[in-house]
Image (cartoon, rainbow, N blue to C red):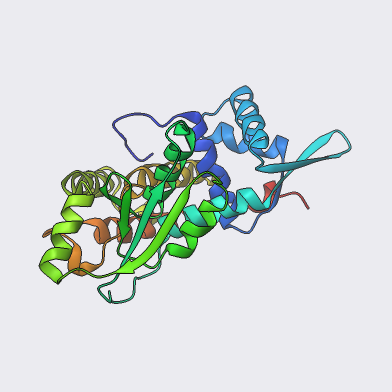
Amino acid sequence: MVDTENSPKPTSLAMDLLGDFDRTGGREIRLKALVALGEELDISGPVMRVTLARLRERGWFDVRREGRESIYRFTPTALQALDEGRRKIFRDPTAPWNGEWSMVIYTVPENDRQTRDDLRKKLAWLGFGSLAAATWVCPHPRLDAVANTAALLPTARLTLLTTRTTGLPADRAMAAQCWELDEIAADYAAFVRRLRTGHGDFRARTLDAGAALAERVRLVNAYRHVVQRDPQLPTELQPPGWTGDEAHRLFMQAHEALAATSTDLYAKAAAS
């Protein structure tokens, strides 16, 4: 199991379990099978059922009956959220940076704190950092994603811009201002250290399918909690000694090694 300073919450692990199932191409899963998979992660049946009920209230599932069994199917809302998470965690190599920044300037009614909080969380997840109180920037072309988010927040008013600074020194200074890069770097270094010293080569280990699945989901959970704060800066903006790329490489190696043993469990759990 991937070590973390604090044990992950069952609901957090359940979310990563669902995301891992989705990445294998599954769309429908029997409740009984999902509960059984959760038990591999020490998530009790009652906790898994409560978690699924809450996700259903948020529009993540359509549920149908097949005899005495309940079949859960991901909705478009769930698939969009899982796809966003997949892009963040299993990122493709970034193209060379063209020096452009995406900028979002927003206004939200003072009494609508929920919309303001939701917008900030979404901007942070998309890789934006706070330059000023209501001005956020990102070194990637993600204004379309912001526009899609804004469509779901009718009280938010956004101005979307693409801009440049005076040059690379100013770019680096802005990156240092917008993100806690030292803290993120420390998290990456700790993740790399735990993966190297605690596990060695996953391919050399012998695990049954259930244990491999549990390791795989816990690995994703640990990495997600690091990468969700990372704006995935272009190389030009990364501080010296940045270990984010090494962490991603080691994560992918471990994940692929564990997938070779555990993926069949998802195929068996999927509703036919």
Residue 56's place in the image compared with 148, above or below, is above
Work out whether residue 201 or residue 49 is closer to the camera in this orientation and state it: 49
Q: Residue 39 lies in what quarter of the image? A: top right
Q: Residue 62 lies in what quarter of the image? A: top right
Q: Please give the name of the residue rendered at 25% of the width and 57% of the height, measured from the top-left corner.
A: 244
Residue 34's place in the image compared with 88, above or below, is above
Q: Position of residue 42 (x, y in %)?
A: 51, 29
Q: Please give the name of the residue rendered at 37% of the width and 65% of the height, measured from the top-left corner.
A: 161
Residue 97's place in the image compared with 179, above or below, is below
Q: Please give the name of the residue rendered at 28% of the width and 55% of the height, measured from the top-left corner.
A: 247
Work out whether residue 87 or residue 268 is closer to the camera in this orientation and state it: 87
Q: Position of residue 173 (x, y in %)?
A: 13, 58
Q: Position of residue 264 (x, y in %)?
A: 61, 54
Q: Please give the name of the residue rendered at 86% of the width and 33% of the height, measured from the top-left corner.
A: 68
Left-right relation of 16 to 48: left
Q: Position of residue 209 (x, y in %)?
A: 54, 46
Q: Residue 108 lies in what quarter of the image? A: top left
Work out whether residue 193 or residue 182 is closer to the camera in this orientation and state it: 182
Q: Residue placed farthest to the top in the image?
A: 46
Is residue 265 among what the camera can see? no
Is residue 130 among what the camera can see? yes
Tell me the quadrant of the picture where the N terminus can be found: top left
